[in-house]
Amino acid sequence: MPSINLYAPTSTTSDMDAAIATNGSSTIDPTPLLGANNDYEQRGTTATSDIETDSLHKTASSSNINNNNNINNEDNNNNTPHAPHPPTLQHPITSTKTYFAELSSFFSWKFLSWLAIDQACVGGGSFALVTALSLPLFKELGIGAARQQLYGSMIMSPWAMKPFIGVASDLFPIRGFNKRYLAVYSILIGVIGCVVLLVLYHSGAAESAVHSGQDAVGKLADFIVICFTAVSYQAATLDILGEGKYAELMRLHPESGSSIISFKFGWALLGSIVTQAYVGPLSDLGYYHILFWIALALSLTPFYPTLAGWIPEKIRSIDEPGMIRLCRGCLFDRGSFREKKVPFVVITLCGLSAPLLAALTTYADLVVGLVFAGVLIVAFSAATYYIFPKTFFWVFLSIVFTSMSWISIGSAVGYYYTASEECVPNGPNFNYTFYITVTGIVGSIVNFLGVILYQNFLSSWRFRPVLIVTIVIGSLASIVDLIIIMRWNIAIGIPDKVFFLLGNAVFENLVYIMQSIPMSSIYAKIAPPGMESAVFAYTVGIANFCNMVSQLLGSGVIKWSGMKTVGDDCDFDALPDLIVIFQILVPMVVGIPAAFMIPNVLQTEHLIDWEHEQWYQDRAEDDEDEPIEQNENEEGEDSGEDSRLEPHLL
């Protein structure tokens, strides 16, 4: 799918999910992730066998569905769980209520609330704010498009660190919790980044640097990049925690389909609509300090829900087999690490390679960095081949090729659209209010509608046709940029703003969301039992790593093409050729064959039959008689912890 474009008005969460993202573009509940050999410490519990635990979860799921009044009589009468019915345009209010009622049969309301707050206020809030600011802020400092795109890869590097974050979450419980305090610390890091930005712009350091020359501007830009990276780290950490939890539950309940992913994207898009509404006008006015105050408030929003434990997890104890104490308040699950040492080491190295690559290419040499990246990708591919089942390996290769096929030149396109009349005579000359706010809001609304359209029309398709169709349409969407740059729209009497709104803002955003949902579902569905968190983080991390490499390749392409993107004598003559080659032809030539590496199954089915593969099964069988205690109070009632969220997976 397309790599995240930090310089266009599209809304993204994560991934660089993406992008994803993406443009987006998660961690996992570390407790079940570590396998069946864990004794979960619970108050007032009783032991049950693995089979009994699995039955309890299935019964709970069916029971919760039956308790949703009149959601679906036929399904309720048959006790048959089904994917939540998506909201429809014909009955928007009723269908939305039904959707959320059915969604809550698979996920607790506290987790759904935490996920909504994270995506709306951090993924679509503070993170979307700083990425949208990259274009006006760095451009005002006189930094060219190629250098800006290098800064963008550095800012996005925490998203490629997800494998490391996931492993740390799984193996190092802090004060008994795998995720809670890791999330809290990430929030504090994001807050510190926002505070430093406020100090820089309130103290007048930014204005002083601009008047002092390029050396001072370079140092200021380095501080800004570090602060933006801190906000990005917060967003990436919270994202991997949430993704890991729903990956675990999607494996347990494949009938839930892509509903939770649509829920996540929906809240991220809602947050981005609000964020983009004020970023453009305030950027045109130069009120960056106000934007950083808003970013600070948004970064603090998930603090209380996270500290209060709205991400459900069991308390870990030093009494568990294989658990040792590293220091006061921090444990290490040495038993789980020894059981699956090789996968954990490979996954950790994958996560740590991202910031190293970003620093090498940004502050040392781009060519050396790209060679280093190529060696790493080959090494990780070889390790994946020898460690994981062959089906997993082919899906892994598909993710690598698809992610790297979209070689980003987004910074050059953004500079062209917002260039002054002196830089690009008779060009579009968009201001930030139009380019970021107007088109961003239109694009976010289209993305939101795209989620509904996907759930209604494409969620029942098999993975291959969905990916192929979206790859082809996504490649052809770049023709809109080509037409505007060649001024063909003016020749037929269509103004730039009208053509851009009806073409780029609508077409590209719709395609993006329809690519992101199935890819996110693939990441979740290939996570094996017992290592959901780490392996999910590995696949998402390698996708983000490849997206980062595509950003670096794009930066090199812009630099080596000879384009000049700042000043009064700009030169964008090479831009049309770059769009045709790297945005239209390469994605189709590479991406379509890569789609055939993915099993052609329905989105409600498992991608990999882990029981048939028997991956690490010998280890699991040694532990399958370990009891899991059920959390009940003295009256025998549920203590408030949703048992559906803690499945026994091995």
Image: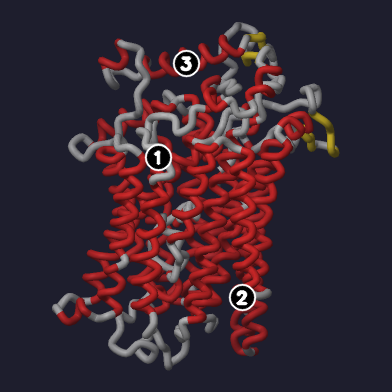
Front position in the image: 364 or 384: 384
Residue shown at 31% from the left, 44% from the top: 465
Label 2: how many residues lie within 10 Å, few (<14), some (14-19) or many (20+)? many
Element under label 3? helix
Give the position of the C terminus as an image quadrant.
Answer: top right
Q: How far apart are the alpha carbons under marks 3 and 2?
A: 53 Å
Lower position in the chain sequence, tag 1 or tag 2: 2
| 595 to 485, vertically: above or below | above
Q: How many marks?
A: 3
In the depicted structure, whether residue 363 falls above or below residue 31:
below
Q: Which residue is mark 3?
A: 58
Of residues 161 and 316, the one drawn nearer to the viewer in this rendering: 161
- First reached walking from the N terminus: tag 3 or tag 2: 3
Dot 2 falls on a residue whose secondary structure is helix
Q: Name the outermost residue toward the left.
A: 492
Percent x, y of residue 576: 34, 77
Q: Secondary structure at mark 1?
A: helix
Residue picked out by circle 2: 221
Residue that numbered label 1 is attached to: 263
Which of the numbered marks, if any, corresponds to residue 133?
A: none
Report if residue 353 is visible in the image: yes
Hey, which quadrant is residue 495 in on the image? bottom left
Question: Which amino acid, mark 1?
Answer: Phe
